[in-house]
Each structure stands twice: as C-alpha cells, then as structure tokens.
Image (cartoon, rainbow, N blue to C red):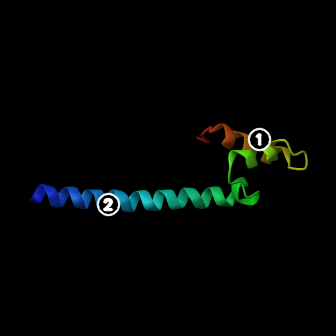
Amino acid sequence: MNFLIALVVGALVLQIVLFFMIRAKKKKLKDGVIGRYDIRTPADAWKLMNDQSIPEEDRLEIERIYKGEDET
C-alpha cells in the first residue's frame, strides 16, 4: 500500500513540475518572434521567412525555430 501511495505522490509531483516547465517555455516563446509575429503553423513561419520586410535577425530566428534547432 505504501508503494502505491508513493507512486501516486511521485506522479503528482512530476505533473506539477512539468506544468511549470511548459508554462515557462510558452512564456519565453511568446515573448520572442513567435509571439511578435503570431506564428501558429509552419506555413506561417515559411511565409515570414520569405518576407523581405521582416528584419534579417528575426528571419534567422524564425528559420532556426522552423527547422527545430535548439538554442543551447
């Protein structure tokens, strides 16, 4: 019985930790180019990468996100 309680408590703690990690990641992305240009789909990102009115540094950031490259 103790094992089951420990397992449930561990799963609950994991869910809480994941919730806050995902929330922080979403906030970071919203403050970046994704939020600035309201990118919701890869098609939106593709259109913005080809838009010459977007600053070059933002286009490079959008391309990095589009390709799925990590920023570490």
Q: Measured from the top left, where is residue 59 in percent x and y? A: 79, 44
User: Is residue 9 depicted above or below 67 in this figure?
Assistant: below
Q: Residue furthest right?
A: 53
On the image, the x and y values in percent for residue 40 come to: 68, 54
Instruction: Please state if 16 lies on the left or on the right of 62 as rendered.
Output: left
Where is residue 17? Give x, y as percent: 39, 59
Q: Amino acid at mark 2?
A: Val
Rendered position, 20 above or below 63: below
Residue at which label 2 appears: 13
In the structure shown, which secondary structural element does the residue marked by tag 1 occupy? helix
Q: What's the residue at 73%, 54% (across, down)?
A: 33
Quarter of the N terminus within the rendering: bottom left
Q: Which residue is mark 1?
A: 60
Of the numbered discs 2 and 1, the one sitting upstream in the chain is: 2
Q: Secondary structure at mark 2?
A: helix
Q: Is residue 70 left or right of residue 55?
A: left
Q: Residue at x 68, y 50 (%)?
A: 41
Q: Could you tell me residue 11's position as x and y percent?
A: 29, 57
Count the marks: how many? 2
- View extreme (left): residue: 1
Give the amino acid at mark 1. Answer: Leu
Distance of mark 2 from mark 1, alpha carbons?
A: 38 Å
Give neighbour class at mark 1: few <14, some 14-19, many 20+ (Cα, 10 Å).
few
Place residue 27 in its image quadrant.
bottom right
| Residue at 81% in and 47% down | 48
Quarter containing the C terminus? top right
Q: Quadrant of residue 39?
A: bottom right
